Image (cartoon, grey):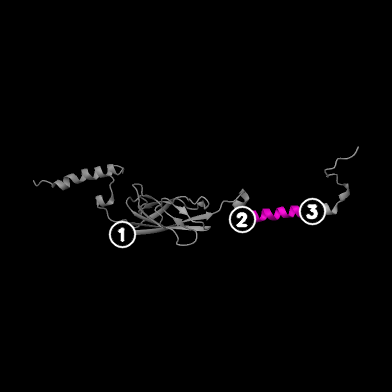
Amino acid sequence: MQSRPWGATLRPLLTLSLAFLLGLPPGIAPAAEQGQAAPAKLNIVIVEGEGAINNIRQRTAREPIVQVEDENHRPVAGAAVLFLLPDSGPSGVFEGGGRTFATKTDSAGRAVGKGLKLNKEQGKLQIQVQATFQGVTASATIAQVSAVPTTGAGAARHGISGKTIAILAAAAGAAVVVGVVLATRGGNSSSCECGSTPRKR
């Protein structure tokens, strides 16, 4: 009877050890170790960041988090993920000061665009995401908004900027002053007892 090679005997033990070190569930190892074929397709699920309204005065934004899955919605570990910010308009930089940030998915198939800092431009911010694993690629877009915080719930609901609010407030103040002046001119000024001279008894 022919004995099995040492490599074939030790491979299952090494696979289990590697899975344990990477924090994967028992029996699950990276695809490269299992020799699995490439997935038919990849899906990018946006976990955090979609629809976020960022405060450009603070210059920080909600970091985008995505999860890469295969065609059966199972997380893909070790997939290469690239986050890209626009070259102009509402944009910013990632950790390291660049408009792109490259990373890999963890054991749960998740990747984070770390250290996102905004520029001073207001408007819609679109973050492009690309994922690649064993020659299969996928892309997605995370839509956010860069804005100056407004004062008042009504202004926030209607999207009125702080500058617009200041103009409206100044106009309202001017209207009050004009009303007071007109009321004073139309009244009998001789009956006013608002002077500083006390009344004689």
Confirm whether the magenta stretch covers residue 170: yes
Mark 3 falls on what kind of element? helix
**CB atoms at circles 2 and 3 under 8 Å apart?**
no
| Residue occupying the point 65% across, 56% down | 167
Confirm whether the magenta stretch covers residue 169: yes
Mark 1–mark 2 Cα distance, whole angstroms, equals 50 Å
| Residue occupying the point 51% across, 55% down | 145
Choose the circle earlier in sequence order: 1 or 2. Answer: 1
Choose the circle earlier in sequence order: 2 or 3. Answer: 2
Q: Is residue 3 left or right of residue 130?
A: left
Residue type highlighted by circle 2: Lys
Q: Identify whether 13 is placed above or below 124.
A: above
Which residue position is annotated with label 3? Answer: 181
Query: Residue 156 location in percent, x, y?
Result: 59, 51
Q: Nearer the viewer, mark 3 or mark 1?
A: 3
Query: Residue 78 location in percent, x, y?
Result: 32, 51
Query: Residue 24 location in percent, x, y?
Result: 31, 44
Image disc number at residue 14 = none
What quarter of the picture does the C terminus occupy?
top right
Choose the circle earlier in sequence order: 3 or 1. Answer: 1
Stretch in magenta? 162-182
Which residue position is annotated with label 1? Answer: 135
Image disc number at residue 163 = 2
Residue type highlighted by circle 1: Gly
Prevalent SS, magenta region: helix
Mark 2 falls on what kind of element? helix
Q: Nearer the viewer, mark 2 or mark 3?
A: 3
Mark 1 falls on what kind of element? loop
Choose between 114 and 120: the one closer to the eye: 120
Mark 3–mark 1 Cα distance, whole angstroms, equals 77 Å
Residue type highlighted by circle 3: Val
